[in-house]
Image: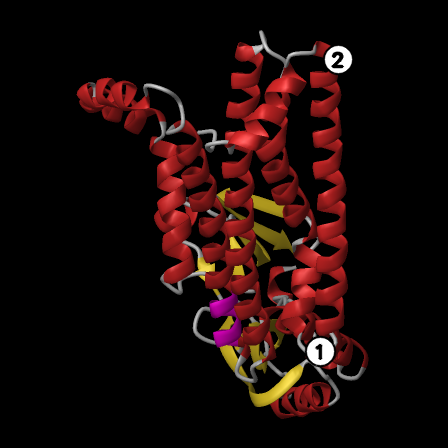
Amino acid sequence: MTPEIPADVSEITESVTTNLWTAWSAVAISAVGALALAFVVVWVFKAVTSRLGRRHEVFRELSRRFPKPTFWFVTVIGWKATVPLFFPQGFDDLKGAADYALDLSIIAVIGWILGKILILLIDGAMRRQDSVSGDAFTARRRRTQLRMIRRLVIAVVAVLTIAAMLLTIPGAETFGASLFASAGVASIVAGLAAQSTLGNLVAGIQLAFSNALKVGDTVEVDDQFGTIEEITLTYVVVQIWDDRRHVLPSTYFTTTPYTNWTRNQTAVTGTVFVEADYTVDVDAVRAELERILDAAPEWDRRSWGLIVSDATGGVAQLRATMTAADGDLLWDLRCKVREQLVAFIATQRPQDLSRTRVQVDPDAT
């Protein structure tokens, strides 16, 4: 809605708009003037926030994030206040379209700035969370929740901004009433069409705030070991050990069984199985396992052990257990223990290798 113009300004604009070339020249000058004013305001804004940024990090973030929103806010406000006034007479339709477009632009820029402010607050909370000393488990859980809140805030601000823009449409109240009359049918159709998307959205929020899954968790999905790299509103990205990305819908983790090795803590326990002959010296293998773990930086020194877990068919199965700070370190530790135990038995105690015994009956020949 165009504000009321003072009488003296109205006389000036009327005299300008009566001449076609003068009017268009005034439009161009006012548009360029608004841009020049925006450049000056942004320059002052960056100068002030950069100087204050030496004292506090908030001003550094303002200087980094808000120059563009400030520029476009000043620009569209300047255009709104000047450009429609100088449109030549006889171009009322074009003037109305430009005025309406500027109204939409102001709403969009305000939504942009509001979203920037909220994201600034959330990112500040994430940085404080990263700087606070504490266990990695709690930090990863809170970081996952803050990332989900960040995405929700962006989505909500975008929806509210679009809704505010739609409300500026002339006759929107009548249009809304007609839509409300058919809301029952529309809701059913929309529900059926968006069932999968809404299901993933709800599942994503559930994963973020139920503590069932966090960014950085070590999981086993589809017979693949990997680390949760990203949790979005609709899908989860799992980084496989060979750097592949396994992208799964959020509903997968709410409807399909999976293994989370680090749900309540990052420290995990792993096993290594080695087969040997019945005559194996278990104490010697146990001592070698202790030596291997003492020399391995991946071992967190919480616990370890070696027992004979099975003995069938002339083969003794040795089970070695060990602990590590997280799933990735445990994988490396298990591979190292397996390699060195096999090498130890093969080179240092070849008599302990599993063998097949055949008894020959002399009378049968």
Q: Position of residue 334 (x, y in %)?
A: 65, 72
Q: Can you tell which quarter of the image residue 179 is in?
A: top left
Q: Position of residue 337 (x, y in %)?
A: 69, 77
254 and 205: which is toward the camera: 205
Which residue is at the front of the view, 99 or 149?
Answer: 99
Label 2 sits on residue? 21
- Vertical relation: 114 (above or below) 350: above
Q: Name the residue at 67% across, 92% down.
A: 287
Q: In the rendered structure, which segment of residues is drawn in magenta?
A: 137-143
Query: Residue 181: percent from the left, percent from the top?
Result: 18, 20
Tell me where residue 92 appears, x and y as whole percent.
54, 12
Q: Which mark is residue 341?
A: 1
Task: Specify the label residue 86 is tagged with.
Answer: none
43 over 155 or under it: above or below:
below
Q: Main secondary structure of the magenta part?
A: helix
Q: Image quarter for residue 210?
A: bottom left
Q: Residue at x 62, y 73 (%)?
A: 330
Which secondary structure lies at badge 2? Answer: helix
Whether residue 325 can be seen here:
yes
Amino acid found under the numbered disc labelled 2: Trp
Q: Residues within 10 Å of mark 2 (few under 14, many from 20)?
A: few
Secondary structure found at label 1: helix
